[in-house]
Amino acid sequence: MTNRDIKSKRVERQVKLPTSKAVEIAWKSIRQRLHRSLVVTSGIILAMAFLMYILSSDKAIDGMRNWMREAADTAEIQSAKKRVETLQPQVLALASEITIAAAKLPANASDTFDDKKSFGQEFVEIQKELGPLPVSPDVMKKLLATRAEMVNTFTQWREATTNLKEAKIIMNGPQNLVAMMKGNGVPTTDAEIRNARTQTNWLIALALLVAFAGILNSMLMSVTERFREIGTMKCLGALDSFIVKLFLIESFFQGGAGTIMGILLGLLLSMVGVTAQYGGYAWKMYPYPSIAAATGLCLVVGVLLTVGGAVYPAWRAARMHPIEAMRVET
Amino acid sequence: MSQTTAPTPVTADSLSEYTVRTIGVKRSYKMGTEEVHALRGVDIQINRGEYISIMGPSGSGKSTLFNMIGGLDKPSEGKVYIDEVDIAQLDAYELAWMRCRKIGYIFQTFNLIPVMTAIENVMLPMIFAGMNTADAQDKAAEILKRVELGHRMVNKPSEMSGGQQQRVAIARAFANDPAIILADEPTGNLDLTTGTLIIELLRQLNKERGVTIISATHDHKMLAVSDRIIWIRDGQIDKIERREDLNIQVGTIDGH
């Protein structure tokens, strides 16, 4: 009997395990070493959070710039302008009615009017909110204590003034926003924006680089610290392809989870950031489609980087002789 | 696929009586520009069911020979036959099959997969062999009971003592009913009593399953139960002793 014959009888080819088995083992491994994988994942989370923060803040500011450019023509601002035009005379008329009535008050008029109870706020507080009343709070109390019908007039004045104030804020929004942006050193004119564009692009490139380095480092770490495990698995009959598959799937899970967490973190930070800086203006024309595009980009970049970062170490680990792999001190 | 069948019933004895056979095995490594000869021509024959210890100082080539026998390394020159198959002719798939079905490995540092429970560790080689999960579970449970770990099946390695971990590793090595068990300093990380228990267990399994056990060791307790001891020095066989001769020797060394 020749050697070949013996071989064909005594040795079979190792079966290839289905991918589902690799998924099962990878999933188990991730769940079991959650703490450890969180450390690895934290690199991915931070990197992706940085990238997403830069991208979405940039988009949010773009959105505000668009709003500034287009706001003057929007129905909102147009109607605010009209409202200011109609409210202004109303407020003046009501105020003068109150002033005239107050002038006629007798000197010894009682000032027992309970403003807190009638309007929910004391006159002093209303004044802080809306600006000076037509007459001073003390006189106002006397007037309303003596002439009950003036309560209605004051209510009307208060309402009209509130509306006027709001309408004015809306009408002056774009100017306010420009002032805010200038205060923050954000370019506002087209020429400035063009100049600043390069800088932003550099920042985005830097964020990408940070993401790349962070993720690659994390993946290298996670594979290297498991050389012994890989060697053991090979001794137990794992095929190289199975080990590569195992690590790619694991890194896919890890990268996916880390990327999603990073994106959420970055997005949240940027939302909080722009809101803190620009208040409601940030949400006037928040660029949801661009933000969605940025999210998609980050997702692709994150997962590609993670899986891509795992390919080399996993391939190297799988090709190692089992003994070499186990010789590595851990 | 004959996935769940026991080891190939091919009449081994009709072909040859040797489980492992090496012919003029040489192995050299490149260390920088220098050529290091780890093995300088080794011929050994190991019979089915034998309990063999390989002894030798570190750097003697003992580990290299051990790895060669285990199909973990290939010779630069010469032939290594495992179950009469020349391992040099095997491709990656066949080698993996061999490691999975023919050989069981036991390590000094246990090398259990830390994230898996005892039973999952024992099931792993069966899963690699293509066995379905339910069958693997039953079989793993049975082997774990055999090594007296029936009560610790769902424990992680970190929750077990060294001796228990090594018993899980032994159960794992026996998972696919291998022909050969390779034990690399199996008692090296264990205390005296635990080590003795592990050696006894290995010896029992060796007798009741007829499996060939080959271990690299410094442990004199291990030598005492071995059928033969192969002494390696400078990449060559220094001497081969049978147990009968050895008993006297251990006596003189230990002084009792």
Image: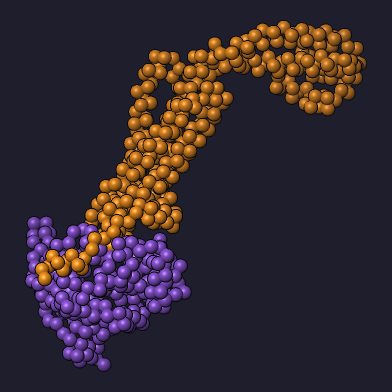
Chain colours: A orange, B purple
Quadrant of residue A48 within the rendered picture: top left
Above or below, comparing residue B100 to residue A265 in the picture:
below
In front: B1, or A32?
B1
Query: Going 23% across and 59% down the picture, which residue do you hit?
Result: B93
In front: A267, or A194?
A267
Query: Going 35% across and 26% down the picture, which residue do you hit?
Result: A201
Q: Quadrant of the N terminus of chain A?
A: bottom left
Residue B154 visible at all:
yes
Residue B71 visible at all:
no
Above or below, comparing residue B90 to residue A200 in the picture:
below
In front: A113, or A206?
A206
Q: Quadrant of the C terminus of chain A?
A: bottom left
Provide residue B113's location: percent of width, then percent of height: 36, 63
Provide residue A273's location: percent of width, then percent of height: 51, 31
Quadrant of residue B140 within the rendered picture: bottom left
- In this rendering, position of residue B151 left or right of residue A137: left
In front: A103, or A145?
A145
- In this rendering, position of residue A79 left or right of residue B236: right
**Figure disc tally:** 0
Provide residue B99's location: percent of width, then percent of height: 25, 65
Above or below, comparing residue A271 to residue A240 in the picture:
above
Provide residue B12's location: percent of width, then percent of height: 20, 76
Quadrant of residue B136 within the rendered picture: bottom left
Query: Going 63% across and 12% down the picture, which residue do you hit?
Result: A79
Query: Going 65% across and 9% down the picture, which residue do you hit?
Result: A82
